[in-house]
Amino acid sequence: MNQPTTPSSGRMPRQIPYIIANEGCERFSFYGMRNILTPFLISTLLLFLPESERTGEAKHVFHTFVIGVYFFPLLGGWLADRFFGKYNTVFWLSLVYCAGHACLAIFEDNVKGFYLGLGLIALGSGGIKPLVSSFVGDQFDQTNKDKAKIVFDAFYWIINFGSFFASLLMPLFLKNYGPAVAFGIPGIMMFIATMVFWSGKKKYVHVPPAAPNPHSFSRVSRTALSTNGAGRTVAMVGLFGAIASLLMSPSWGFVIAACTALVLLLAFVGMGISMQLERARGHHPDDAVDGVRAVLRILVVFALVTPFWSLFDQKASTWIVQANSMITTFSIFGNEFTLLPAQMQALNPLLVMLLIPFNNLVLFPMLQKIGITPTPLRRMTSGIAFSALSWLVIGAIQVSMDAGTPTSMAWQILPYALLTMGEVLVSATGLEFAYSQAPASMKGAIMALWSLAVTVGNLWVLVVNAAVKNDTVMNSIAGSGLSVIAFQMFFFAGFAALAAVAFGLYAKRYKMVDHYRSLDAAKSPASAKA
């Protein structure tokens, strides 16, 4: 589990501030619209539905949108790795992103126009998501790679800096000035982000797209499956399962069916390739075959993280729904003030900005002193466990509310703190892990697959939400004595707890590698094309 390190003394890249500033503005724009999406849908856009159906439909729309955001990284990673490079792909998809924000502001009372805007934002935001973080990694080499962790932490800190102010302010703008203003301001911030990123163009290290490679991941995988064997049979099971899933679209809904098909393909084809990978030796160099093996091992890690995302993203849907039924007036030192339910989400980025320096300056050094090395995979295992604990607490709060106990929204502070610690240990660490473990030709694609883990996590939410509409399931929940929302909370807590155990067991067998680029693997800023 320990990543090999070598001393380095290179300086911090001077172009990093452009990327960090771009990320802060972009995250303000994204979280500014995302964190008011559920309350806007319930209170305004979905008024044509019966009141009893609005909350469920709002959650469905929200998680479908998130699925899109974390699915399109596959497209962005592929375009960058094979055709346009990271910078060009980020810049042009950022303009699509801006157009999506404009649609939200313009079509505030038009369902089709608003959903078009969500689609464009999903394409733009998702398309650039794996590339900006891997673009940060491209600015480092073997001489200064020790500073990459500092920048990845700063990168994650600025994400939450933008998210904090967006979460605090946008619900107020929505309430006081209406959706056109509330969705328009994030659009302006996204345009500023694009211009900041563009202004650093000549200063960046530009790693060119990978040339066509006869020993690429896909070609080695194809060779491994080209002969008959158990692995090929397993891969075919995945293919037929994916087709069957798509045929279920009329009853399951397209999003659930398509995402399930993708999961089946990735899981079964991946297992099939792993089973027959040694057959590719002799047809391809050993390092190419070993590279495919490394990617498959990374994908197992990503798969085990998906339950964490199913819990984390529901703070912007399920937790807001719970907060809508809580007492929103607080009293501190004799002064009373009221928070909107959506504003509680500002607590998450605020805690992130506090926990990242606390972990780096206090917690991790303390663990080192007592002989416990907080390796990336150990941190991620602990993070998944913290998320499970947060949902046990939020579930207990819901049980108390279901019993008729008036409950202050302040009680959500504890589960927010636990979930945020989980986020810092999983998400911030995952960015660094995904980049460092990815072979050079697969950086963008691997970062995209890291984002795809969020898509799968939100798929679990849609599947569970659809399952509770079944009469048999509803009768079973009723027999448990719990409300539907409380039952779901405890279900997701158990789901994450099992994932933490599985992740920890796999982490013990995983060997870390070092795939930071060498000095001659990229164009310097001076020689890069303008």
Image: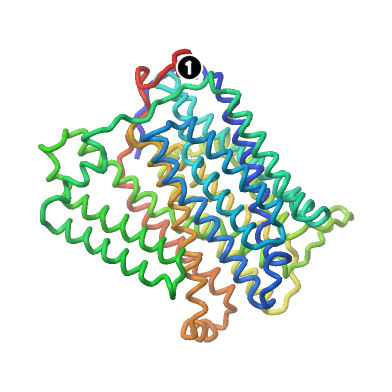
Label 1, secondary structure: give it: loop
Give residue 81's position: percent from left, percent from top. 38, 35
Residue at image position (50%, 56%) is: 67
Which residue is labeled 1 in the image? 525
Left or right of 5? Residue 493 is right
Question: Looking at the picture, how far across and down is residue 123, in whole percent?
Answer: 52, 48
Q: Going by the picture, which residue comes out furthest to the top?
A: 526
Rendered view: 503 above or below 437: below
In the displayed orientation, state which residue is furthest to the right.
Answer: 334
Q: Is residue 350 left or right of residue 118?
A: right
Classify residue 233 by image quadrant: bottom left
Left or right for 298, reference 166: left
| Foreground of the two, 411 or 449 | 449
Mark 1 Cα-neighbour bin, 10 Å: few <14, some 14–19, many ≥20: some
Residue 412 placement: quadrant? bottom right
Name which residue lies at 34% across and 45% down: 298
Q: In this rendering, is residue 412 above or below 186?
A: below
In this rendering, the answer to whether 487 lies above or below 40 is below
Residue positioned 36% across, 59% down in the render: 263
- Count the numbered circles shown: 1
Amino acid carrying mark 1 in the image = Pro
| Residue 348 placement, left or right of 133 | right
Where residue 244 appears, as percent x and y from the top left, is 32, 69
- Give the quadrant of the N terminus: top left
